Amino acid sequence: QKASEAKAAKQTIDDSLRNIQSHDPNSPWASIVTYIKQDGYVSESRTVTFAIWVGNVLEESVDELSAIFSKFGKISSSSGQGFPPIRIFDGQNKCAIINFTHFESASRAIEACNDNDIVFGADSKAFATAQPYGSTKLIVQLQELLRGKPRSVAPFSDVEAVANDPRLKLDHRWLDIVAKCPALFDVVARGQRLMLKSSPLDA
């Protein structure tokens, strides 16, 4: 069974790489294929998602949270770990983890919470708070890393140093995660360096 799962996972990454190359063979992203294959890399077949942590949740249900946050973008059908896309954690400080399909959606949701645009409770009792989580937090940290570098370029070794922080609790290799954000990043110098693109999110 493990052999068949590994074969299926490898097929998934091979299909993804072919899609990258067929979409634009001249794109710098195509050069990442060589780097991945040289590294003996086999991707997980699970989908990369971009999660946010949401605090001050009151009596809201999963369906209600979905209705509130889906206006910022598509909520994933599952989390990267195979959990439901929205999980509510009960306790003294009730909170939730919400998984989006795209980083930009997660970013918009965090911004809305930070601007006090989302209020929980039937009587508007509490402002929602939010922080990047998992893959979303990695992308935020990589943006910060690259902004501090000359020409916004860093070698893969610097990127891996950030991604290897166990506190991020990543479910995927950073290559998978970054590849989901082509509007934010580019690969240069035969796939050995990462560059930050200028984007509306940086404005």
Image (spheres, rainbow, N blue to C red):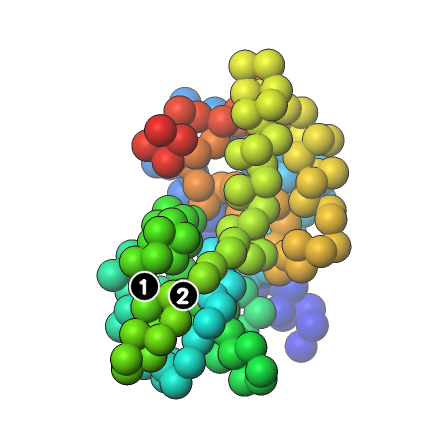
| Image-quadrant location for residue 93 | bottom right
Residue 137 visible, this orientation: yes
What residue sits 40% from the left and 24% below the top?
A: 198
Residue 128: mark: 2
Quarter of the N terminus within the rendering? bottom right
Q: Is residue 194 left or right of residue 101?
A: right
Residue 158: mark: none
Residue 73, percent across and down?
30, 57
| Image-quadrant location for residue 65 | bottom left
What crowding class fits label 2: few (fewer than 14 Cα within 10 Å), some (14-19), or many (20 or more)?
many
Residue 81, percent across and down?
58, 69
**In the rendered image, the vertical position of residue 115 relative to residue 201, given as above or below:** below
What residue sits 67% from the left and 59% below the top?
A: 169
Q: Earlier in the sequence, mark 2 or mark 1?
A: 1
Residue that carries the numbered disc 1 in the rendered image: 118
What residue sits 47% from the left and 31% below the top?
A: 185
**Looking at the picture, which amino acid does disc 2 mark?**
Ala
**In the rendered image, the vertical position of residue 3 relative to residue 37, given as above or below:** below
Residue 167, percent across and down?
71, 56
